[in-house]
Image (cartoon, rainbow, N blue to C red):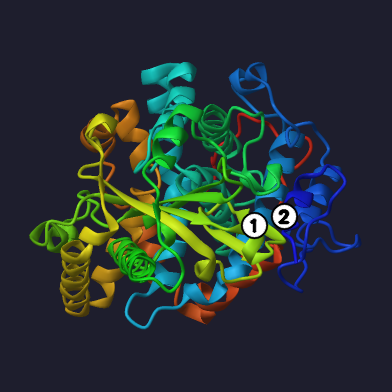
Amino acid sequence: MAAKYTQRYESNDNGLRFQELTYTGNFVGLEPVPDGILGDRIMKSRAQSHVLEQVSEADVRVDDFTIPELNDLNNYLAWNIWDVLVMRATEGASGMIPRQEYEILAMMHEFYRWPELLRMTTDEVGVDGVIAIGASARQEIGTKVNCVHDWSIGAVGFGMGRCGLLALEVIEANDYIEESNTILKFMQRVQWGKRQDGWILNSQNRYRCQIHEPALLDKLAMLLERCEPGSPSHDQLIRFNAAAELLSFLDHFDCRLGLGDTGPYRLANGNLLIIRDLFCNEDAYHWSDVCDHENVPHCYTVLLEIDAEAMALEEIRVNDISTTFTRPKNYIPHVVGGAVLVREKWDTPMGEVYPVSIAELGPRLTGIQNATFKLYSKLARMCRRQLITNGMYVYYVGMILPHLRKAGTYDKACADYQLWEIDQRISNYYYDITKRGFAKTTVPNKIFSGAGYLPFGENADRRRSKYLWS
């Protein structure tokens, strides 16, 4: 059976359904919305503004969204969050790390603290500088200016953070409109600079994240080694990818910020290329010292060449949390080529990024495995409060860390804005999130159903912040 995935890129194609669940959100009384390409099409058709269409540079340079635009972004991000999270909802529970607890605290913390940090960064580098942050990803691998971090600015910091605070009943629907604008504008500008096709999210362009410049792709394609399924080289590449992916998850406290896929890119021979960054050693986190001990670099970039015809590929999605999904589900048996590259530090120049042959991955695999064991041992000795606090840092600091680094405002954020401090309100919420199943039941229900993403009032003042505490 021949591959049919290219049909998904035809304008009248609605794609496949990857799940049976549907989404309602703020569209009570209307037909529920499915996942994927069809879901994106329906969400765009229900928009009250043009903000979900391909935007221009002039659109991006406007400083504020209108209320209809804010509500359209709110509704779309709520559906998009559902679209990516229900595919992997079981990841929300960990036997070691209280993920749901740290996630909701971090999300709410982001909504409170990010606006002034992102406004300061925009003031420091200007709109051109923010766009340039996104554009930098076009010529780099091993960069955290990627899908999941850029998406997180709006989807997590604004969308889920606001949703959590509304569910906790500490803010109301028309609070913090000015701050919401700041967060969403920063996301739009970074994403526009990175994609440069007018779309902001992968889901808006049929789940394609084809951001890299042709010259970089040509260089990477030249590094691909043949590794036929069943061969020792194939086994070595897949084992290395799996081990590095595990460490990247663990170093980021069991979340997806350690992984970043881009693609799919069509190679000259017709096969597809996925470029996967695995951030195994983030030096911003003190627990990453175990990775230093094993000489694990900041990032391993794994190139995976997939034979789409042999797989009879029907659809491939690189979603907005940097993850590749396919139908049929398992593409590993159809990986026919690969390569591994090393970026030692987050700011290592691209000219110093180097490849490692598949045959020489053995010692590096051992280093990854040793670091993983040491990190598990370290985490096992942490108390619940410490685990939650560290997880909060991974989200709250980590999601905007690459943007602050690129802008050169990270040090200022630490020194003048107390980036690593925890807001007193969030510290107090620590004691509330376990009551009445808030973290494990209330928030997931609000997020997955979309019921918690309340719209802004159509006559609300865009300058409104939060002026009354009760």
Neighbor class of circle 2 (other Cα within 10 Å; few <14, some 14-19, many 20+) is many
Residue at image location 70% in from the left, 43% down from the top: 204
Q: For the view shown, which residue lies furthest in the left direction?
A: 293
Q: Where is residue 37 in the image (x, y as percent from the top left)?
A: 76, 53
* In this rendering, position of residue 183 left or right of residue 391: right
Q: Does 110 appear above or below 213?
A: below
Residue beneath label 1, please? 316
Residue 363 vs residue 379, the one in the foreground: 363
Q: Where is residue 271 in the image (x, y as percent from the top left)?
A: 58, 51
Q: What element does badge 2 sit on?
A: helix
Task: Tell me, yes or no, whether the two marked residues, 1 and 2, touch with CB atoms within 8 Å.
Answer: yes
Residue beneath label 2, please? 5
* In this rendering, position of residue 247 left or right of residue 90: left
First in sequence: mark 1 vs mark 2: 2
* In this rendering, position of residue 216 left or right of residue 51: left
Q: Does 155 appear above or below 293?
A: above
In the image, what residue type sits under mark 2? Tyr
